Amino acid sequence: MIQTVITYPDKRLKEISKPIENFDAKLHTILDDMYETMMAQNGVGLAAIQIAIPIRVLLLNIPDEENEQHKENLIEMINPCILKSEGETSYQEGCLSVPGFYEDITRFETVEVEYFDRDGNKQTLQAAELLSVAVQHEMDHLEGKLFIEKLSYAKRKKFEKELKKQLRDNKKAS
Ligand code: Y12
Ligand code: CO
């Protein structure tokens, strides 16, 4: 079922998510709902806290060269941990919880991540390029952090100005 994505400045986005202990049917339903929700909103990544569930679960579905997403490329990560990180890269990020705002953010260039799949099997992922950026962005959500917190003072001011305009426009439209 498609769920509501909560948006900034909803305080729930600041919550630190709790580890999963049981890899059961309830978890599988949450993962399935997250996938439907992410696809319905053209997302490439989604953390459970974005649908107001504070658990350490995230999804990634990176588009191919034709910019198309395929379910076979879906990665479900439960209780992810970064084992290794290298380099530095900058990428224009967006977030379903911060709609309409995109900005360049600096992160590690590559990361090695250990996580559990939906059946509780331990997995490792070597991530580079968009996958690396997206996994770091989603893992920040598990710590209650949004990409806008990484902005410089000047860019944060630009974001706040755009947010105020969005809120004004939404009020006018309703
Ligand atoms: C680079 C870095 C981090 C990520 C993490 C996941 N972010 C998203 O999936 C963002 C999706 C997104 C989709 C939007 O909607 C459309 O494009 C139709 C969007 O636009 C609005 O809300 C107006 C904003 C963000 C991914 C890549
Ligand atoms: Co996000």
Image: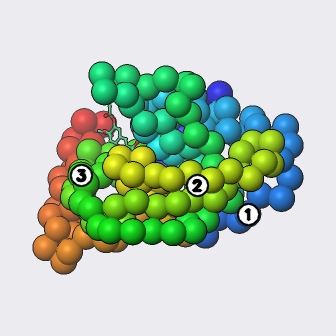
Q: What residue is rendered at 86% in x and 43% in y?
A: 24
Q: What residue is rendered at 63% in x and 49% in y?
A: 77
Q: Is mark 1 within 8 Å of ligand 2?
A: no
Q: What residue is rendered at 58% in x and 40% in y?
A: 75
Q: Amino acid at mark 3?
A: Gln
Q: Which of the marked residues, 2 or 1, is nearer the chain's N terminus?
A: 1
Q: Nearer the viewer, residue 68 or 160?
A: 68
Q: CA distance from mark 2 to mark 3?
A: 22 Å
Q: Nearer the viewer, residue 96 or 137?
A: 137
- Above or below: residue 19 compared with residue 47: below
Quadrant location of the C terminus in the rendered image: top left
As helix, strand or loop, the secondary structure at mark 1 comes to loop
Marks 2,1: beta carbons within 8 A: no
Q: Amino acid at mark 1?
A: Pro
Q: CA distance from mark 2 to mark 1?
A: 12 Å
Q: Nearer the viewer, residue 124 or 40?
A: 124
User: What is the x, y in percent for residue 46?
Assistant: 51, 45
**Residue tagged 3:** 92
Q: What residue is rendered at 30% in x and 22% in y?
A: 66
Residue 49: image tag: 2
- Above or below: residue 13 compared with residue 38: below
Quadrant location of the N terminus in the rendered image: top right
